[in-house]
Image: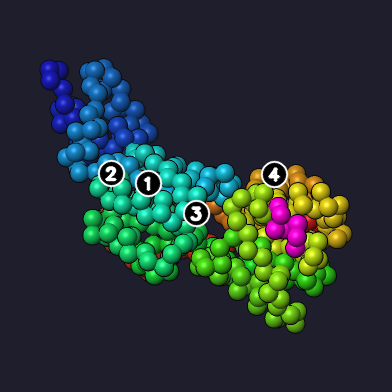
Amino acid sequence: MDNINIKKLAKELNLSTSTVSRAFRGNSDINKETKERILHLANELNYEPNHYASNLRERKSRTIAVIVPEIANNFFSQAINGIERVAREKGYHILIYLTYDDYEKEVSFINNLNNGRVDGIIMSVSGEANDHNYLNKLRKKKIPLVFFDRVYEDIATAKVTTNDYESSFLATKHLIKGGCKRIAYLVVNKKMSIGKMRMQGYADALTKYEIPYEEDLVVDCSNEHDANYETIGNIIKKVKPDGIFASVERLAISTYYVCQDLGVKIPEDIKIISFSSLEIAPLLNPSLSTITQPALDMGTKAAKLLFKAIESGSDLTVNNVVVLNAEIIKRRSTGR
């Protein structure tokens, strides 16, 4: 067959051009046998699809951006796996941008992506500053945005989160039931919505069980291990908590190092629980009790919401909110 193109290929197969096109993009909504028949004939006729030209006709980049604070954290690694899996099924690529919790980087990334380089954005925010108007530019350019885990409440778009307040309340309750009366809460950013929700759960659990809230037990930490090591060491030596609630996993790891170096025994002297998706949590000595978020599922849900908007051309409003349940897994670090 001379001058083979997608229309002639579709006619030869008695299929629509859209079905043939989706087969070349690896979409999962096509019958396996049909896909094999398409690819087999294309191979026989030496036909190679021109994805670039196709994307130009559709005015789509076939690419989405994922903006996250870091990927060293197991939670974000798992969430990205979920996003990538959905994107691949849709015939899309992903670009990953790391903010390292730097607000200026976040603004810069959004401004650079405003030019149509991507068809949509999935984002876990840096949590800094109060002016988030730069995100409203995306709506004007019809670039859909989905928040996951860490969100800005004042931006009306789709969000995928977990039950942070309830999880924190139950984690604090678990420490209290284990005999803790002076529980230190370690936090990186109290201003973020996720930080506020987790801290409120902690505070309300103390109130419920008639334990006084103490300002010096709420400890501001950072993203730097050395700084956290010093801060947590000072708290353990001077304030002497009998329980540690780490709002992110890096703070639990720093606490383990401090306890080892100070000769503080876990869980005999101090009990520890942390938000964490750390796969080696059961292998730590002692094994770490965790509030584990369904990270893979969160990434998958966020990606599905985004592609629903991309494919329909509709806005993602604040009504599109998915709240998943985290799981408290009790291990040796809390004496169970």
Q: Quadrant of residue 182?
A: bottom right
- Residue 104 lies in quadrant: bottom left
Q: Camera-side residue: 139 or 82? A: 139
| Numbered disc 3: secondary structure | loop
* Nearer-N-terminus badge (3/1): 1
| Mark sitting earlier along the chain (2/3) | 3
Q: Amino acid at mark 4?
A: Ile
Give the x, y percent position of residue 327.
Answer: 64, 59
**Disc 1 designates what residue?**
65
Question: Disc 1 marks which amino acid?
Answer: Ala
Density class for disc 1 (Cα within 10 Å; few <14, some 14-19, many ≥20) is many
Task: Tell me the residue at 70%/78% (across/down).
Answer: 213
25 in relation to 118, above or below = above
Q: Is residue 29 left or right of residue 193?
A: left
Q: Where residue 229 sits: x, y (%)?
A: 71, 52
Q: Main structural element of the magenta stretch: helix, strand or loop?
A: helix
Q: Quadrant of the C terminus?
A: bottom right
- Which range is magenta? 229-235
> Where residue 86 sits in the image (x, y, percent)?
42, 45
Q: Is residue 232 magenta?
A: yes
Instruction: Tell which of 198 and 171 is nearer to you.
Output: 198
Judging from the image, the colouring scheme is rainbow
